[in-house]
Image (cartoon, rainbow, N blue to C red):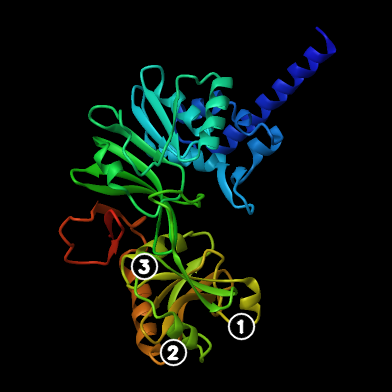
């Protein structure tokens, strides 16, 4: 054996060790729970799908690794974090022999899907960017996944030669602002759709099961993805309440008098504390945010810089933002504070601005109290998706998307 061969062998051994450590960590964290997904992660050489990055970073990265940027530096493609791939695949419940359509191509997830469907299944990976699909095609060929089909096109449009009876699974790996009719039309009667969906300023990866003409969510993952391009691109409205330091994100065309809210925000701050308490270990705030999106309207997300909080422009708002309601003259948002006499607990409250602060503060505070009494211990809210033309629901908030209507239970 030559010195060069010995070095290659040592490198391969080192990489295998990195991969094994990644898999063990994912199992211990509960991201991987099935033997099938565990085997797929052990089989796919993740580092080969980000050859420009050291293997240690590829296997140990806690978040996504960007693989392409547009002019100006905006990221348009990435290798998602291992834990996110794992949780999405577990939620998809992919089985041997299935026909899977992946929207958003990078190569690595398609390889994992190919391992899960086995030799009797098929994987079709599609992306709108020819550079991305060309790269994915090359990397899949180099790693032995030549049987994965790679297409270039808009994921919101139909695949011309979709399988008869529809796709068993549709896996979307880019943030979508809608559920295009194509996905419902081409999903099998017992199919499942996993998609990072953006609504009311939130981003959640949802696993949907088909129930007749509607979709019903059964898994919710807190995650962020690069936005889709094309028909399902995300185009939220951002209202700057204090330049770039405090911003309100408004989605789905909700009415918002920007000038009125900008005038209300600098006025006196009115606080109302609900007595609803949380501990840092409960992890309930992401669940509460989704629940509120289905309980109050209009609903958006207020985000602030750390400097804005230090200057007292806002109350204690987490980096993920705060649920916010408004009307033509005023606004109110959810805030936190350390619970009195309980150093390990936090109290939920409302901060309101503007002449109608009392009314809006009451609406939001009562919603927080109602969540605490009726929904706190009932798991993730269930999201139903129906086609845009379906009959209106008689109760609850309806979130209108271009192609679908969402309701949150």
Tell which circle, 2 or 1, labels the residue nearer the N-terminal end. Answer: 1
For disc 1, the marked residue is 312
For disc 3, the marked residue is 292
Residue closest to the eye, 236 or 342: 236
Residue 28 in the image: x percent, y percent?
55, 39
Q: Is residue 250 above or below residue 188?
A: below
Image quadrant assignment for residue 159: top left
* SS for dot 1: loop
The label number, if any, that marks residue 354 in the structure image: 2
Q: Nearer the viewer, mark 2 or mark 1?
A: 2
Tell which circle, 1 or 3, labels the residue nearer the N-terminal end. Answer: 3
143 horizontally vs 253: left or right:
right
Residue 247 in the image: x percent, y percent?
52, 73
- Marks 2/3 in contact by CB < 8 Å: the verdict is no
Image quarter (top left, top right, bottom left or bottom right) of the N terminus: top right
x 51%, y 36%: residue: 130
Residue 89 in the image: x percent, y percent?
43, 36
Residue closest to the eye, 20 or 146: 146
x 51%, y 92%: residue: 268
Task: Characterize the local packing of mark 3: few (<14), some (14-19) or many (20 or more) Cα atoms within 10 angstroms.
Answer: many
Q: From mark 2 to mark 1, how far is it between C-alphas?
A: 17 Å
Residue closest to the eye, 10 or 131: 131
x 43%, y 85%: residue: 260
């Amino acid at each position: 054996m030559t010195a060069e061969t010995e070095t290659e062998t040592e490198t391969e051994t080192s990489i295998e060790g990195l991969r094994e450590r990644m898999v063990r960590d994912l199992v211990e964290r509960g991201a991987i729970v099935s033997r099938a997904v565990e085997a797929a992660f052990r089989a796919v050489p993740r580092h080969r799908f980000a050859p420009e990055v050291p293997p240690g970073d590829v296997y140990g990265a806690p978040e996504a690794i960007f693989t392409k940027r547009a002019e100006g530096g905006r990221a348009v493609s990435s290798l998602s974090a291992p834990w996110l791939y794992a949780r999405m695949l577990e939620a998809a419940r992919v089985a041997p022999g299935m026909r899977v359509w992946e929207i958003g191509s990078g190569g690595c997830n398609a390889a994992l899907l190919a391992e899960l469907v086995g030799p009797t299944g098929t994987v079709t990976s599609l992306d709108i960017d020819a550079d991305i699909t060309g790269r994915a095609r090359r990397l899949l060929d180099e790693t032995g996944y030549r049987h994965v089909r790679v297409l270039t096109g808009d994921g919101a449009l139909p695949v011309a030669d979709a399988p008869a009876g529809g796709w068993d699974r549709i896996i979307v790996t880019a943030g979508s602002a809608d559920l295009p009719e194509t996905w419902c039309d081409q999903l099998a009667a017992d199919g499942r759709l996993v998609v990072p969906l953006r609504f009311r300023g939130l981003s959640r990866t949802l696993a949907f099961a088909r129930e007749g003409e509607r979709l019903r969510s059964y898994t919710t993952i807190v995650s962020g993805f690069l936005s889709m391009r094309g028909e399902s691109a995300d185009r939220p409205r951002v209202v700057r309440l204090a330049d770039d330091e405090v911003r309100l994100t408004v989605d789905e065309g909700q009415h918002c008098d920007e000038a009125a809210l900008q005038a209300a925000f600098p006025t006196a701050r009115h606080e109302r504390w609900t007595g609803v308490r949380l501990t840092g270990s409960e992890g309930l705030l992401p669940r509460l945010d989704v629940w509120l999106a289905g309980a109050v309207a209009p609903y958006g997300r207020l985000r602030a810089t750390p400097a804005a909080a230090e200057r007292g422009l806002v109350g204690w708002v987490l980096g993920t933002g705060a649920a916010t309601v408004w009307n033509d003259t005023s606004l109110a948002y959810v805030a936190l504070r350390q619970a009195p006499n309980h150093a390990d607990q936090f109290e939920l409250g409302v901060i309101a601005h503007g002449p109608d602060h009392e009314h809006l503060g009451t609406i939001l505070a009562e919603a927080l109290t109602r969540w605490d009494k009726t929904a706190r211990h009932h798991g993730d809210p269930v999201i139903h998706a129906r086609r845009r033309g379906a009959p209106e629901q008689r109760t609850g908030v309806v979130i209108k998307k271009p192609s679908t209507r969402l309701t949150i239970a």
